[in-house]
Amino acid sequence: MRSAVARQAQGAVTRKNAVGHSLSLNCMELPAHPIAASHARRLAVHTLARWDMQWSTDMAELIMSELVANAVKATGELRDLARAGDASGLREFIRVGLYRFRGRIVIEVWDRGRTPPRTKSGALDDENGRGLQIVDDLADQWGYRWLATGGKVVWATITPHA
Ligand SMILES: Nc1ncnc2c1ncn2[C@@H]1O[C@H](COP(=O)(O)OP(=O)(O)O)[C@@H](O)[C@H]1O
Ligand SMILES: [Mg+2]
């Protein structure tokens, strides 16, 4: 996987957005399986080293882990729903990406799940309901958006002073 991540990073691109700011991005598709979290973390470590933004690595790894775990879980719930019907056409993957924009890191995780992320402020225990709280604590901002092409992206931004 190390080499696959390295190859992916070599494919990273730099684009100009609508207002002309430089936007670097690096993204990959992963199986919707718990193993995806470690691959996504490696992508983050490798990408941030490449961008010389190691200050953000620890935060990025934690955020990536939580968002990917949730995306995998959401895809699994979709699979369970589909099981009663014909699930043969269901492709189970998620997408993860890192963007660099004006000194800020944006982490994005896409899944097909049809329900939104929700912080569970009331009923935290050691095992459940802490993931988004961790994201909320570490990220400058976070949120989600539905895509017209299907699924949703949950995103979080990290800044040096966050
Ligand atoms: N990508 C996602 N798709 C659908 N629901 C999500 C997603 N991420 C989070 N959620 C919802 O938000 C809740 C809180 O997430 P989190 O704080 O990570 O706790 P946990 O994963 O332990 O349930 C989840 O239980 C789930 O209902
Ligand atoms: Mg979680």
Image (spheres, grey):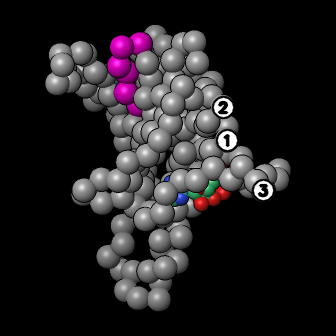
- In the image, 3: left or right of 34? left
Q: Please, which residue is most extreme toward the front here?
A: 122
Disc 2: which residue: 137
In depth, the one of 137 and 103 nearer the eye is 137
> How would you rate the neighbour count of disc 2 (Cα within 10 Å): few for under 14, some for 14-19, many for 20 or more?
few
> How would you rate the neighbour count of disc 1 (Cα within 10 Å): few for under 14, some for 14-19, many for 20 or more?
some
Regarding mark 2 in the picture, which secondary structure is present there?
helix
Tell me the residue at 83%/50% (across/down): 126
The quadrant holding residue 139 is: top right
Residue 113, compared with residue 64, is above or below; it is below
Disc 1 to disc 2, how far (Cα)?
A: 6 Å
- Beta carbon of the mark 1 residue lies under 8 A of ligand 1: yes
Q: Is residue 31 visible?
A: yes
- In the image, 12: left or right of 85? left
Q: Is residue 141 on the magenta stretch? A: no
Disc 3: which residue: 123
- In the image, 13: left or right of 129? left
Disc 1: which residue: 133
Going by the numbered disc 2, the residue's amino acid type is Asp
Q: Which residues are magenta?
A: 98-103
Q: Is residue 45 visible?
A: no
First in sequence: mark 2 vs mark 3: 3
In depth, the one of 61 and 101 nearer the eye is 101
- Beta carbon of the mark 2 residue lies under 8 A of ligand 1: no
Q: Are marks 1 and 2 in contact (CB under 8 Å)?
A: yes
Instruction: Provide residue 52's location: percent of width, then percent of height.
Output: 46, 10
The circle on residue 31 is none
Going by the numbered disc 1, the residue's amino acid type is Gln
Instruction: Provide residue 107's location: percent of width, then percent of height.
Output: 45, 33
Report how many numbered discs are placed on residues in the image: 3
- In the image, 17: left or right of 41? left
